[in-house]
Image (cartoon, helix red, strand yellow):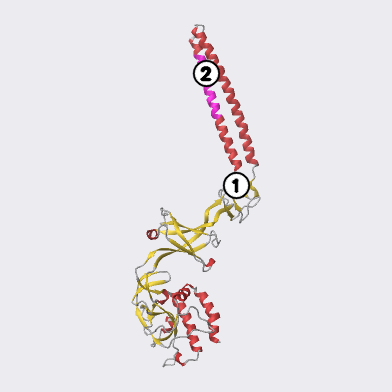
């Protein structure tokens, strides 16, 4: 509200200066005081869009941070910032000498274990042949039972030895597969197709699991991540329209839909994340950019709608109300811009009334009120000039809603600079 009052005062000051410079005797009241100039619009009847304003962070579609899975120096970098890569394309090659040596050692160990397994198979075959021979002799009562049992035990021992060597071979093969996988990891490949950015890979740099080498993502299909409180989730749901804007992209508005909402609240903050999918063919959004998001989740009840700058808290009484011009007609066309060299005309002096209002619905730029009627001309710029004066007469310049809404969105410092450069220069002339 303070910002609105500041904007109103600055614009009203300029209009008052312009009125003084015109030399028209109608600019002065009976006490030889300047009659203030204000801007006014007509109140409307309708409903307000209900919206939740949030801060969001832009992320690329399927955005992935690339980290090495092994520790080794970088010996070659294949990708640069802005390159498009396909899934599986190499990005970085790490020093692989140590991992090749480990692979060769595992291969040698596998060969040894395979040889031991073949030796165990031969021993088992020999033991089984001996057992068959002993069984034949036993059937003829040519050997004792003890000798037959000894042959059976030798077969069992050979079978156990073979089982052990087979397990050792399996283990050696698994170790060699691990060593091969480690060697493969020395070539870091893109897990997705997309644009490479955030390069932090340089030849000679020691890379480990915590080293972020690149970020890869689909920048043509971005998403905006917003934080939603428990109360917000009650109003916001998947499919609702979201409007994205930022000072970085100027007056451009981007539209998307709430695509996903996490059903889990974070411990401590009791908030969750929502995701808004935004096509980015124009390239206006950059991953990591902060943006403002308005999520539209419904409409208010029908009421008299006024710009938020029309709401004025009287500094002497503390009452919240609106200045209404009951005797002002539509004899002049509402203006959208003010040319300081050729300002549009003002009305003849007319009386204002200060009416108390009750706000029943509040949007981002407008409010729904009780206390004024649709069609009433209401002051939106210049209320501050009426403080301290017993004469509520003003000269009115009719304005369009678009002009007032644009003024409300203007930052105070930008507005002051515009006034100082353009309007005051025109007044002095």
**Residue beneath disc 1:** 188
Residue 167 visible in image? yes
- For the record, the magenta segment spans 149-168
- What's the CA distance linking mark 1 and mark 2? 51 Å
Q: What x and y, as percent, mark residue 300?
A: 36, 67
Q: Which circle, 1 or 2, is nearer the viewer?
A: 1
Residue 176 position by quadrant:
top right
Q: Above or below — where is 133 with respect to 187?
A: above
**Residue beneath disc 2:** 155
Q: What secondary structure predominates along the stretch shown in magenta?
A: helix
At 36% from the left edge and 81% from the top edge, which residue is drawn?
354
Answer with mark 1 or mark 2, whichever residue precedes in sequence: 2
**Is residue 36 inside the magenta stretch?**
no
At 48% from the left edge and 10% from the top edge, which residue is drawn?
145
Q: What x and y, as percent, mark residue 414?
A: 52, 75
**Apparent side of residue 320 relative to residue 225 in the rendered image (left or right):** left
């Amino acid at each position: 509200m303070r910002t609105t009052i500041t904007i109103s005062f600055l614009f009203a000051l300029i209009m008052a200066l312009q009125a003084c410079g015109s030399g028209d005797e109608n600019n002065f009241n009976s006490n030889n005081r300047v009659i203030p100039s204000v801007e006014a619009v007509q109140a409307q009847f309708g409903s307000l869009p209900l919206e939740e304003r949030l801060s969001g962070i832009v992320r690329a579609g399927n955005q992935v941070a690339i980290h090495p899975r092994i520790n080794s120096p970088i010996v070659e970098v294949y990708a640069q910032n802005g390159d498009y890569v396909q899934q599986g394309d190499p990005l970085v090659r790490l020093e692989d000498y140590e991992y090749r040596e480990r692979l060769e050692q595992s291969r040698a160990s596998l060969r040894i274990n395979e040889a031991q397994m073949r030796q165990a198979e031969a021993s088992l075959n020999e033991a089984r042949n001996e057992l068959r021979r002993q069984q034949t002799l036993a059937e003829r009562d040519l050997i004792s039972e003890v000798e037959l049992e000894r042959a059976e035990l030798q077969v069992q021992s050979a079978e156990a030895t073979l089982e052990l060597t087979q397990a050792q071979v399996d283990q050696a093969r698994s170790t060699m597969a691990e060593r091969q996988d480690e060697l493969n990891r020395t070539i870091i490949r893109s897990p997705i197709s997309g644009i490479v950015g955030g390069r932090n890979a340089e030849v000679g740099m020691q890379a480990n699991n915590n080293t972020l080498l690149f970020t890869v993502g689909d920048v043509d299909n971005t998403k905006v991540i917003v934080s939603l409180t428990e109360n917000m989730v009650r109003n916001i749901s998947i499919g609702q329209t979201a409007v994205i804007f930022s000072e970085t992209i100027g007056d451009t508005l981007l539209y998307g839909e709430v695509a996903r909402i996490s059903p889990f609240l974070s411990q401590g903050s009791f908030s969750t994340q929502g995701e808004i999918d935004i096509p980015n063919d124009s390239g206006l959004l950059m991953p990591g950019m902060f943006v403002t998001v308005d999520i539209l989740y419904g409409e208010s009840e029908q009421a008299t709608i006024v710009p938020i700058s029309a709401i004025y808290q009287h500094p002497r009484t503390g009452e919240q109300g609106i200045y209404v011009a009951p005797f002002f007609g539509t004899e002049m066309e509402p203006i959208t811009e003010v040319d300081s060299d050729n300002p549009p005309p003002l009305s003849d002096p007319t009386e204002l009334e200060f009416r108390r209002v009750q706000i029943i619905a509040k949007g981002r730029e407008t409010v729904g009120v009780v206390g004024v009627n649709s069609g009433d001309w209401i002051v939106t710029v210049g209320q501050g000039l009426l403080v301290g004066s017993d004469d509520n007469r003003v000269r009115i310049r009719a304005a369009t809603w678009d002009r007032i809404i644009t003024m409300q969105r203007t930052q105070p410092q930008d507005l002051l600079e515009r006034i100082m450069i353009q309007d005051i220069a025109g007044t002095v002339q």
